[in-house]
Image (cartoon, grey):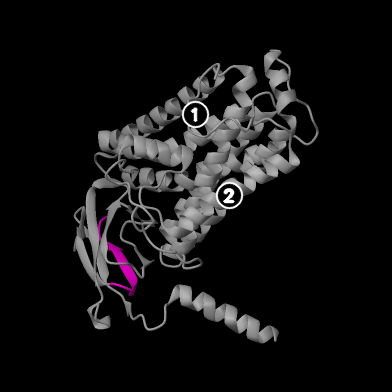
Amino acid sequence: MLARVLLAAVAAAGLWVMPAGAAELSPLLVIHDRQFEPNALAFPAGVRIKLLVRNLDSMPAEFESYDMSREVVVPGHGEVTIYIGPLEPGSYEFFNDFNHEMRGSVVVKPDDAKGK
Amino acid sequence: MLATAIIMFREVLEAALIIAIVLGASRGIAGRGRWIAGGIALGLSGASFVAILANVASTTFSGNGQAILNAVILLGAVAMLTWHNVWMSTHGRQMSAAISAVGSEVQDGSRPLAALLVVTTAAVMREGSEAVLFLWAIAAGGEHGTSMVLGGLGGVVVGVLVGLLLYLGLLRIPARHFFSVTSWLILLLAAGLAAQAAGFLNQAGLLPALGYGVWNTSHILSQHSIAGQLLHVLVGYIARPSGIEVVFYVGTLLTILTLMRTRGGRTMAPAKLPGQPVGPGV
């Protein structure tokens, strides 16, 4: 009984972390010469994204997004993994909180596979 | 130089505003100065420690580690602000009397001094670790290091001054309204911090987002604007909140209000609404 409840809880938690059927994408976002490369990322809707942010500059950066409520410090010459989504179709801006000139966006297109 | 000043100003502003509100709300509590100063010192040590951790162990202490630490710090602050407000709702009248009589202070044994310590520590540690990491990097960055560090310190000074202005502004509120205003400020502050914590818990994959962008008011009041940033710190304004952030905000607001009503007296008159201008003789 207890085991079944626990199992259900774990399954529910798993649903949050990885919705059924959602593939995981792991793109790379590079910070180089005070630019995000690429500065526009495109993804299908409903997919969980494992974004690897690699900072080639010596200055630390702070990957921040008001739209996706993300805020992660990326040390100079360091890298971090940031989980995003699954997102609904739309455009989501992100920026470097240590340099607001540095901006980029995530564009999420409707999921064609589901025939929407 | 100016760029680093602006960045440091932004990092310091949140802590400065929170400390100003806490200083105001704890007016008339004996010993508060020492505890708040202790909180600032502790926060700075904690911030330096976290900055070193982020730099040395960047892979292990990557995205999720930062997010969970931030969430814990923020929730700690929310709990302490709750305690403070509930305590205030039972001692408010005594406190009002204390600040009317200059120099007298509340000596009650259960003063929420530890709450002041934890809230200040949390406020300083939260943005402080980013500030330390940033300053450290520019200091180590070679030729322009010195002038940039000076710029950064200038930003810190301006941030502290803004906090001081808020505090002095609070002190001008007449004694009989004073604690109802600071109680509302603390209430909204706590709700906003709880919403931020929800964002971090979602970032760490521990909570569902429940939808990104329950509403979007970026075009009316952008969070990049100064007004947007001030409101974000003071009342938890989020231009495009996720569902879980809204749930935490409302949940915290209702929880604290309920605790104040059931445990406390009548410091916060029901007629006073949030967003009511802070001023004399309402």
Most extreme residue toward the top is: B102
Foreground of the two, A69 or A90: A90
* For residue B204, above or below residue B70: below
| B85 on left or right of A82 | right
- What chain does badge 2 belong to? B
Look at the picture and state if B211 lies above or below B40: below
Image quarter (top left, top right, bottom left or bottom right) of the C terminus of chain A: bottom left
**Pointer 1: what residue?**
B276
Q: In this figure, which residue is indicated by the disc labeled 2?
A: B252
Mark positioned earlier in the residue sequence (2 or 1): 2
Q: Residues within 10 Å of mark 1 (few under 14, many from 20)?
A: few
Determine the CA span between mark 2 and mark 1. Answer: 20 Å
Residue B105, position as x, y percentages in the image: 73, 21
In which quadrant of the rendered view does residue B122 lie?
A: top right
What residue do we see at 69% from left, 21% from top?
A: B96
- The chain ID associated with circle 1 is B
Which quadrant holds residue B109?
Answer: top right
Q: Report x, y in % for residue B281.
A: 55, 16
Q: Residues within 10 Å of mark 2 (few under 14, many from 20)?
A: many
The image position of residue A45, as x and y in percent, is 29, 72
Above or below, comparing residue B147 to residue A40 in the picture:
above
**Which region of the structure is painted magenta?**
A45-58
